[in-house]
């Protein structure tokens, strides 16, 4: 049975193991254990039959804007609705905070469109996103990710 729950500090090692290959490929930004620990409350985990099979984070930028980030699903389980369930959980959380918009930077445009996100220009993203996160990416400044936004 698939369930979603908030992450705790004891989950960090499993989270890092799950994301390792995607970080090596440059699909997801690397985050140290300390960085994950600092923002542990933003992560929601997908647990299938007691096993961590995915996670993502809701990072709040302002009273009106949040980001869905670090979305990872275990190889072999992609395309089974786990990622969509995670994003929907984070959107519910954003709504509870009265957030007006949530964005994502992604290579998976169709996936986010299927949830109701629309493509926007990267120039519309918060300036601090580029200098806090994107600058750490091995693809910076030539990035093929697509900016997507969800409006409540």
Image (cartoon, helix red, strand yellow):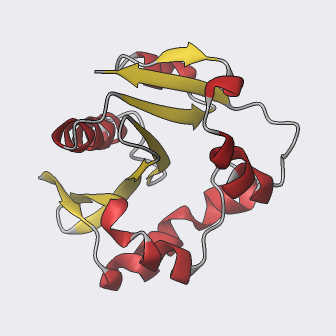
Q: Is residue 26 visible?
A: no
Q: In x, y percent, where is residue 31?
A: 60, 69
Which residue: 84% across, 46% down? Answer: 140
In-image side of 33 versus 30 (left or right): left
- Asked if 64 appears above or below 138 in the picture, the reply is above
Q: Quadrant of residue 13?
A: bottom left
Which residue: 65% across, 48% down? Answer: 128
Q: How many discs mark residues in the rendered view?
A: 0
Looking at this view, is 15 or 37 the one in front? 37
Q: Quadrant of residue 80?
A: top left
Q: In x, y percent, where is residue 109?
A: 56, 22
Q: Is residue 113 visible?
A: yes
- Asked if 49 appears above or below 66 in the picture, the reply is below
Q: In x, y percent, where is residue 131?
A: 74, 52
Say which quadrant the C terminus sits in: top left
Looking at this view, is 26 or 125 the one in front? 125
In-image side of 129 versus 131 (left or right): left
């Amino acid at each position: 049975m698939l369930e979603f729950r908030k992450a705790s500090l004891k989950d960090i090692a499993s989270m890092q193991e799950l994301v390792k290959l995607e970080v090596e490929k440059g699909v997801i930004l690397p985050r140290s254990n300390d960085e994950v620990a600092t923002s542990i409350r933003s992560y929601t985990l997908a647990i299938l039959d007691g096993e961590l099979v995915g996670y993502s984070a809701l990072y709040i930028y302002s009273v009106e804007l949040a980001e869905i980030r670090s979305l990872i699903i275990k190889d072999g389980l992609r395309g089974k609705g786990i990622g969509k369930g995670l994003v929907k959980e984070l959107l519910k959380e954003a709504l509870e905070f009265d957030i007006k918009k949530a964005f994502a930077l992604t290579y998976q445009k169709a996936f986010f469109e299927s949830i109701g996100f629309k493509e926007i220009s990267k120039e519309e993203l918060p300036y601090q996103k580029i200098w806090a996160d994107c600058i750490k990416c091995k693809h910076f400044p030539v990035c093929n990710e697509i900016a997507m936004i969800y409006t409540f």
